[in-house]
Amino acid sequence: MILQIESDPGCKDKIEYYKGLYTTAEEDDDLDGDIISKLSLSIPAFKPEAIDLFPKDSYSYIDKCNKYLARVETSISGTDIYLFSRSNDIVSNYSLTLMPSGKTIRQANNLSPASTSKQSKIELIKLKFF
């Protein structure tokens, strides 16, 4: 089936268009998380690299483009991580990987905090859309 689509002259332009879109999206640091999320839903092969959130202070982590902010609250019962976008949009379909432990938390959206039942020492947070 895939060979039929690739060999069809009518589909060649569309295939090249989506390959170019994929390449551009992977290389573009200015893409907003919502666009990345929509692309990954529309194009299953599109899985961008993680966005690193670096410590700003002992409670806040921010990416190099200042698009995302994670606020970490630690209590006796565990750790809650609130994710915010600079554009105040709802962030959907993402995961947070806490480094150096490697613990990954998947979230449908940022309307509630990502939680872990253990207190975690966090040096870096990796944000990835799925």
Image (cartoon, helix red, strand yellow):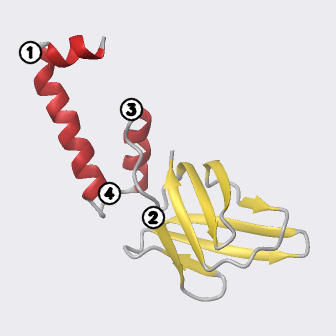
Return the residue at label 3. Answer: 42
Whether tag 2 and tag 3 are in contact, CB under 8 A, the answer is no
Measured in 3D between alpha carbons, the distance from the residue under mark 2 to the one under mark 3, in whole angstroms, is 20 Å
Q: Give left or right: position of 33 versus 27.
A: right
- Decide which of tag 2 and tag 3 comes sooner along the chain: 3
Return the residue at label 2. Answer: 51
- Decide which of tag 4 and tag 2 comes sooner along the chain: 4
Amino acid carrying mark 3 in the image = Ser
Q: Is residue 70 above or below residue 58?
A: above
Residue at 67% across, 77% down: 122
Amino acid carrying mark 2 in the image = Ile
Q: Quadrant of the N terminus?
A: top left
Residue at 85% across, 63% down: 117
Amino acid carrying mark 4 in the image = Leu
Q: Is residue 123 above or below residue 9?
A: below
Residue at 54% across, 86% down: 56
Q: Give left or right: position of 71 versus 130.
A: right
Amino acid carrying mark 1 in the image = Pro
Measured as percent of width and height from the top left, residue 118 is found at 84, 68
Find residue 9 and name its label: 1
Measured as percent of width and height from the top left, residue 74 is found at 79, 76
- Mark 2 lies on a secondary structure that is strand
Return the residue at label 4. Answer: 31
